[in-house]
Image (cartoon, coloured by chain):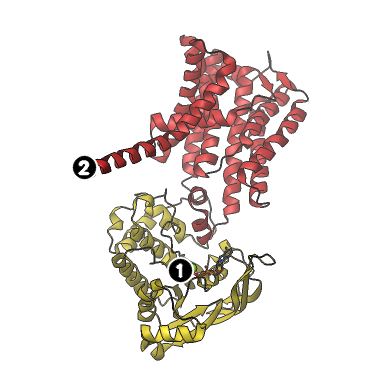
Chain colours: A red, B yellow
Amino acid sequence: MEQILLGAVSLGLLWSIMTLGVYISYRVLDVADLTVEGSITLGASVCARMISTGGDPFLALLVAFFGGMAAGLATGLLHTKLRIPALLSGILTMIALYSINLRVMGMANVSLLRMTTAYSILGSLLGLSKTVSVILLGGLMALAIVFTLYWFFGTEIGSAIRATGNNPRMVRAQGVNTDSTILIGLMLANGLVALSGGLIAQSQNYADVQMGTGAIVIGLASLIIGEVLFGKRSFLSRLLSMLFGAMTYRVIIALVLRLGMPADDLKLFTALTVALALSLPRFKDLRDTLKVSMNGRKSHA
Amino acid sequence: MLKVTGLNKVFNPGTINEKTALDDVSLYLKPGDFVTVIGGNGAGKSTLLNCIAGVYRQEKGSIELDGLRIDNLPEHKRAKYLGRVFQDPLMGTAADMEIQENLALALRRGTFRSLSWGVTAKEKIEFRKQLASLGLGLEDRMSVKVRLLSGGQRQALTLLMAILNTPKLLLLDEHTAALDPKTARKVLELSDRFISSMSLTCMMVTHNMRDAIAVGNRLIMMSQGKIILDVNGEEKKKLTVEQLIRMFSSRAGEEIINDRMVLG
Ligand SMILES: Nc1ncnc2c1ncn2[C@@H]1O[C@H](COP(=O)(O)OP(=O)(O)OP(=O)(O)O)[C@@H](O)[C@H]1O
Ligand SMILES: [Mg+2]
């Protein structure tokens, strides 16, 4: 059991970096960006290709990050310059990335078994087990990213990006090119998603061209769990709650699998959970209107 | 200061919904001119302001501000010279950001944005003073999210943001129309005070004829995309609402102006 939980936590930490990316597009920019499904696989593909051909696993992560940024740039350009709706722009890039990922890997999946990954380097350096080195590296990177994002969104450019998600018209009236802020935001988001994909591929020792399917839903599930369970107070606590949300999601999945749910039903389960969570505000509204009409009736009596 | 020449704006050209919103509009504003703009629904008042601000691109004509052609610049580049307040109090601010963060965004209007801090401690001290000048108690709530403010408070904040980085031209589009009468008067007084103390050049659209007469040194009336009346100085001071209504009916060839316009 303990082993399962530890595994879930380590996986959650790696996915939390992807969740931070989803937070940037979905919450900060207010864009449902489906590029994510392709860019997480892109990160994995790049790492798989580089490592299986003897490349440095840390350099591979860096390249994965930049690859993801390029994917975000593509979606951003489709959306801002060609005026294609954001959702569709994301889908277009996602589909295009499927072919690109196949080309990067040269086949549908690549195994990294017995090859040098970032974790194996760290593990042999500090004499740690695989799980512990995943938690160490994943945790350090996630925290470093949280604090970097916290700094970044406090800067002039970062503030302008936050405002763009809030009220683009006001931002233009304040002299900011909202095309640029959207581009920067989407690049940053997908860079993080691809980095996360690279870290995941290195930890599970393989990359698969299908691994991104449903990633956006997993990201949203983690995001909502994080917000609901760990608060929405300061910006820093919101960012940190993404880490806890991603880990909690993995623990929940590990538990329901252990309770006997077939693994094939996982995506259905996740989709239903997200649908429920996203509709919670609606239920609350419904309850409030019910209450009001009940009270109204009472006062008439 | 502002020189609009032969401005034409057609919406949905070539379709059955074609609509000429501005029909050969020319307008010259001297520095320090405070012009109130009135006219019926759909007269083209907002379109004129939006063309100046670069929200829409005109079909014909030119716009010059302080000797500089601005009609080719995109909206965010023209923003450097313009302060704007909209009719909808939600439109001028970022709801999920703090009061001080909104002010900081406005302070940087027209400057290059870098990776230095979005709000500095020194700026906060200035903001506190400036917010106090609004007389709404906002100076003690600087880190509150704008979402929590009332419509009037948000509109006053938007006004402050518009003038924070002194604009060459201030564009107010019915910025008091969505407020209750008392709050509307307060926001109008604030606007008038800022405009005269800073000698701003300003165009203010309003449906309220009394307001249009009470503030500013010049009044223009629009109908069907044209300026049909332009009154200045002493002549404007002597105007009455009744005179305006009579002039409107005779010049626009329309009998009645809607109630909102008369009563405000
Ligand atoms: N974005 C748009 N697309 C199509 N038509 C538009 C658009 N904006 C304005 N119009 C049309 O242009 C004409 C002028 O509109 P405008 O908003 O400038 O009027 P206004 O004088 O500001 O009126 P109001 O007092 O109602 O605000 C109207 O007929 C309007 O329907
Ligand atoms: Mg209007």
- Letter of the chain that mark 1 sits on in the rendering: B
Question: Residue lying furthest bottom in this view?
Answer: B234
Closer to the camera in the image, B189 or B137: B189
Q: Residue at the spot x=41%, y=61% of the render?
A: B158
Q: Residue at the spot x=38%, y=62% of the render?
A: B155
Give the crowd class for mark 2: few <14, some 14-19, many >=20 residues within 10 Å.
few
Tell whether A34 sits left or right of A284: right
Residue that mark 1 sits on: B173
- The location of residue A51, given as percent across then percent down, is 70, 23
Tell whether A114 sits left or right of A135: right
Q: Dot 2: what SS?
A: loop
Q: Is residue B152 above or below residue B34?
A: above
Closer to the camera in the image, B117 or A243: A243
Q: Quadrant of residue A195?
A: top right
- The location of residue A236, given as percent across then percent down, is 42, 38
The amino acid on which the numbered mark 2 sits, given as a three-letter code, is Ala
- The location of residue B115, given as percent across then percent down, is 52, 49
Q: Dot 1: what SS?
A: strand
Q: Is residue A108 above or below residue B211?
A: above
Residue that mark 2 sits on: A301
Closer to the camera in the image, A264 or A60: A264
Q: Is residue A280 above or below residue A249?
A: below
Q: Which part of the image, by quadrant, shows the C terminus of chain B? A: bottom left
Kindly tell me whether residue A141 is visible in this rendering: no
Dot 1 beta carbon under 8 Å from ligand 2: yes
Q: Quadrant of residue B77?
A: bottom right
Frontmost of labels 2 and 1 is 2
